[in-house]
Image: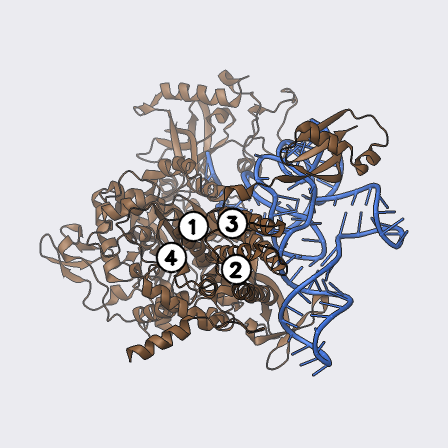
Chain colours: A brown, B blue
Amino acid sequence: MALITAAIERTVKRPISLMGNERYNAPAREKHWQQMWEEAGVFTASNNDERPKCYVLEMFPYPSGRIHVGHSRNYTMGDVFARYKRARGFNVLHPMGWDAFGMPAENAAMERKTHPAQWTYANIAAMRQQLKSMGLSIDWQREFATCDVNYYKQQQKLFLDLLKKGLAYRRSAKVNWDPVDHTVLANEQVIDGRGWRSGALVETKELTQWFFRITEYADELLEALNTLDQWPEKVRLMQANWIGRSEGMLVRWALDPANAPKGISEVEVYTTRPDTLFGASFLAVSPDHPLALAAAADNPKLKEFCDECRRQGTSVVELESAEKKGFDTGLRVQHPLDKDWLLPVWVANFVLMDYGTGAIFGCPSGDQRDLDFARKYDLPVRPVILPPGENAETFAIGDEAVDGDGSMINSDFLDGLDPKSAFEKVVDRLGAMTIGGRPVGERKVNFRLRDWGISRQRYWGCPIPIIHCESCGAVPVPDDQLPVELPADATFDKPGNPLDRHPTWKHVTCPKCQGPAVRETDTMDTFVDSSWYFVRFTAPDADTPVDARAAQYWLPVDQYIGGIEHAILHLLYSRFFFRAISDAGQGIGQLREPFRALFTQGMVTHETYKSQNGEWLSPDEVKIDGDGKNRAARHAVSANPVTIGPIEKMSKSKKNVVDLDAFVGEYGADTARWFVLSDSPPERDVIYTEVGVEGARRYVQRAWRLIDEIAQKTPQRADVMPEFGPEGIALRRAAHKTLHSVGGHIEGLRFNVAVATLYEFTNVLSSTLQKSEDGLDWALREGAELLVQMIAPMMPHLAEECWARLGYNTLLAKQPWPVAEPALLVDDVMTIAVQVNGKRRDELTIARSASKEEIEAAALALEPVTRALEGKPVKKVIVVPQRIVNVVA
RNA sequence: GCGGACGUGGUGGAACUGGUAGACACACAGGACUUAAAAUCCUGAGGCUUAACCGCCGUGCGGGUUCGACUCCCGCCGUCCGCACCA
């Protein structure tokens, strides 16, 4: 029995030589090599290793069901990098897991009557198979899903750490409430003021919710962006804008006691432009500002106005088109720099309660919104900054506010100063004055960033480990009672939170007083799950959330790869959470940034198709006729005309996806890998086309044929190098130069250029194969072996097959990256362009050792050069060795 | 409105810190092999002019710096993305 299997094994293992034009059967061979890798455990990463480490990570997927070719690009890129680094002698960690909590599972439960867990784990099983079929060099032993009890148990510990440290807290906050689905909606789930599923008008509701104190780290998160020099500039900029630091002043304005509401004597305003204080013409407060509420208490019309503002939609369209509206409260304030100057206090719909203090002073001459507002309600407009070149006597504000540089006017002691000095002077002046025992003005740094609300009124998420007790308040679940597990028997037949309506789950005794109490029924935002999974991969089975030794060995992630859509939230939350858990006691050490290098890859796009009745059609339901302008589509079965729509990112909803299984079954994984890496720069989108795929497939076959031919024609290389003729030398130079450049391109993630370089070398190799010369066989074989090793990170199965064909019985996945011979990287002759007056006229091939004088003389002797000179005297000759000669006449 | 990126043949794109623009691929055309097709192989090609060479033009448009600009600077035009009443 054992003998028979061994025999079968051998026949399967040895690739059959190609006689004539036999094709390489990728799908069959790929399965074989995947099995070989698995048996050899090539991709298992050890936490105890002498080699330098390299942690390569692609953003882990949400298990939505199936993987399509669009998803595969991200993993392919990471895999090429991981395989390359492994070959370069690194101990590589390349793990995979599942971002498995979230709403779709609950929706599926509602629609299909399957439990979220069942749905999720079934999807994971299917997608794991798909990823494995791509031949990714992943250490599957470290795999986990965030919905695994073991994972979210550790996350509950982290939550309690943060709570102890004061980095998690509870407060009341507004949410978008869907009154039909009884659920909280994220902003992006509110479309035109209505719930995206129910269509009901969304209400604003105050709920007590849990928050993480990310604002505590606002300054650090902003500052540290400077250290992330291997992140895209774009992402750093987006984060910086999101954090939105501004430097300004808090200014306290005394209310005119004549009609001030009881108990309120001043209004605090945040401004970044205290220099324009003399241009103030009114104060405006948010409809939710305490002063507005107090004033509205005995003013029904004002109350009505405030209510109307609150109803004003939160949708983007509404905010954009919303008119600036206000209501005069009748209250008056004293100007801080002129006691006799009284200004009106308005309630305005454009003032946000949750930025700054919810109150502003309006300076119409310097701010467009304030100007629009002042014009509408006929409030004074007083210019305070005179733009350069304007005359102070005649200058007036028209329809446009002036926010540029200039010199101060109409501003008392600030007159003549530039705005910056005026700013400083006002800071000094107001700082020295007091109101109600405090300074009238003080410097204040403000951030746009808000604390991170993590409460979700959902079932399928990590339960927040808190017990609410009437007498003890919010009590942390004691460590020995963790995890707080999701009840398996929840019901999903109606909207609302299944945890909240579960008959028994939430009723517990208080850990402190043993009295009756209830569990927190909110679960955590799934962004919490993804904020530390990369830490957990370093020790997925540890009893504590973080294994200090493993974390400090592997982190930071050396190369992180994912979509630009996560530029802000996921990446910012992760940067915060990493610091927070470290400061709360997890053994991460001194490290503050989790991701050393970040790469944001482009999407795979595809044409979209729509049937006559407006339904999306998938590519395999459509037949394309003709090409160019005559290109038309019809339905594959009914032959009805089909509209070809715009090229868009592959997505399930538009059905413009190509399923990975179908693709791999037909073409093989290597073709898919090669295709997504070719042509387009990796950070840019790549368009999926049938012809592009055919091109990739052709190359797979061509490479295989070429290697096969060389394997047949040339003997194994002798250890001693023969003497080479010109062809042999040229081939070896090409091979080693390619090796040098492909390595660099992979290192720099320029996969499309690496692919092009490999095509180029393949062309050289196959044309040299037609020639004969002493010693050439040796060079051909060397070239073939190098080619195989170079394509290995991108097309690992084909490379193994070729490697075996070349007579090796080792796994290529275990071979080190070949080293280029430095002597072959430098030519002994060089070809340089010769210009006359900056225009290229000819080129010159000359010994590398030639002196400047020799080059100059040779250049001037060229016929096209003398012709272009037309007898004119040469003024100057610029010779840049190895680059160019420019003759200036 | 604010911020950013990009613009190169029929197409995707290449060109290292300024130094032969169009590598490589796709599509196309011609040829070889074949009874034929597919597959494969060879050849050609930025545009204009030309029989061909030569020549001229050419990296969105206009200017500038430089011996020399796809690359750097200034001003436009266009496309895409992010943020958006943030005081």
Identify residue type, mark 1: Arg
The part of the image, by quadrant, that contains residue A196 is bottom left
List the residue tagged with mark 4.
A814
Give the class, few, some or many, for how many residues have Cα within 10 Å of label 2's Cα (few <14, many ≥20): many
Say whether mark 2 and mark 3 are on the same chain. yes
Q: Position of residue A169 (x, y in %)?
A: 26, 46
Chain identifier of the residue bearing label 1 in the image:
A
Q: Residue, x 24% and y 64% (percent of image)?
A: A486
Q: Are marks 2 and 4 on the same chain?
A: yes
Q: Earlier in the sequence, mark 4 or mark 1?
A: 1
Image x and y of residue A678, in percent = 55, 57
Q: Residue at x 37, y 39 (%)?
A: A221
Q: Secondary structure at mark 3?
A: helix
Q: Which residue is identified by label 2?
A: A676
Q: Earlier in the sequence, mark 2 or mark 1?
A: 1
What residue is disc 1 on?
A310
Q: Is residue A475 left or right of residue B24?
A: left
Q: Residues within 10 Å of mark 3 (few under 14, many from 20)?
A: many
Could you tell me the amino acid type at mark 3?
Leu
Distance, label 4 to label 1, CA atoms, is 65 Å
Q: Position of residue A53 (x, y in %)?
A: 34, 47
The residue nearer to you, when weighing A755 against A210, is A755
Residues tagged by mark 2 and mark 1 found on one chain of the structure: yes
Callout 1: helix, strand or loop? Answer: helix
Taking the image as shown, residue A814 lies to the left or right of residue A318, namely left
The residue type indicated by label 4 comes to Lys
Mark 3 or mark 2, earlier in chain:
2
Instruction: Give how far apart the Cα atoms at labels 2 and 1 are.
Output: 49 Å
| Left or right: B48 in relation to A70 | right
Residue at mark 3 to residue at mark 1: CA–CA distance? 65 Å
